[in-house]
Image (spheres, rainbow, N blue to C red):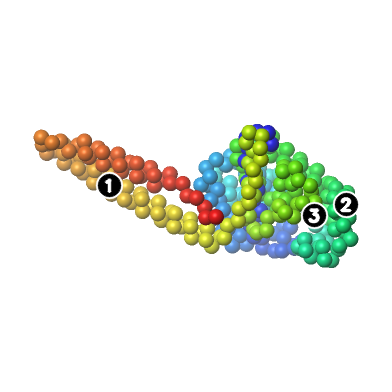
Amino acid sequence: MSRKIRLIFLRHAEPQATGAAKFHAPLTESGRQDAKTIAEFLAIDGAIRAVYTSSLPRARETAELISTRLGVPLKVIPELQEIHLGEWEGKTPDDIRRESPKLVDTFTLDPERFTIPGGEKLSVFLRRIRGALREVQSDLGSGTAVIVAHTVSIAFMLCELLLKDPREFTNYMPSHYCSMSILSSATGSLTYKREHFDMRVSRTFLRQSKDRTYAFMGVSFAIAFASFVAVLQSISTPSETDPRTLCLGISLLAYLSSTFAVFEQVTPPG
């Protein structure tokens, strides 16, 4: 990532099934609402040029809602799919350590030669994830993009870009649906941060922000209308002290207030 680029890694929204059954499951209604809420926050960013997504339905549906809201291109990259976890599907890292300590030791000694029981060989998974990252960087060039993917695929992509040992992947796993991990590259250095939104707080915050904007716009319209009437009156009944200069000043104030209302930048809650 030598160019100026910012990648927003987003875990998909909530699917209708869990474990192996979620492989081809669409989003729940709650998941769709969460995806729309995240899309509103991303729209505030204003710099996103494209959305890339895994081809699995839960990621693709999340990405479609975001790209539609942002009005940016959507590209499906099948290589962004989640690792096939086989017998480990639906289990947490702690579950796996407790149930299969010897397999965990094998992974620790030589992760790239490790194969998940009944699942995907890690070296194959890493090869396709690296290919997906190359495709994103080649297609995007520079600027900001959203990558909608999955828990393990996001964790290993972050390890790859941050030059971390693959065995550290659990440190970079998104813990919640719609969690965001943001990686920025500028002047040759990388910065990384993780974001998690409480969706109930986020929806309330967005609604209040819209209400505040509408209130500003209402006040601005009232000032502009009053200014317009005053200008008409000053033209029809001129006096020694022409009030048009004052009216023009008030009109300018109304214009600035309207501009502030329309383009007000909202900072998401931490």
Mark 1 Cα within 10 Å, few/some/many (few <14, many 20+)?
A: some
CB under 8 Å between callouts 1 and 3? no
SS under mark 1:
helix
Image location of residue 247, percent across then percent down: 22, 40
Label 3 crowd bin: few (<14), some (14–19), many (20+), radius 10 Å: some
Q: Residue at x 73, y 38 (%)?
A: 134
Please, what is the three-letter code of the amino acid marked with disc 3? Answer: His
Gap in angstroms between the C-alphas marked 1 and 3: 61 Å
State the residue lying farthest toward the left. 240
Give me the residue at 79% from left, 47% from top: 165
Element at label 2: helix
Label located before the other in sequence (2 or 3) = 3
* Gap between marks 2 and 3 measured at Cα: 21 Å
Quarter of the image with the C terminus is: bottom right
**Residue under circle 3?**
84
**x, y (%) of residue 27?**
64, 59
Q: Which residue is mark 1?
A: 223
Q: Which numbered disc, 1 or 2, marks the residue that appears first in the sequence?
A: 2
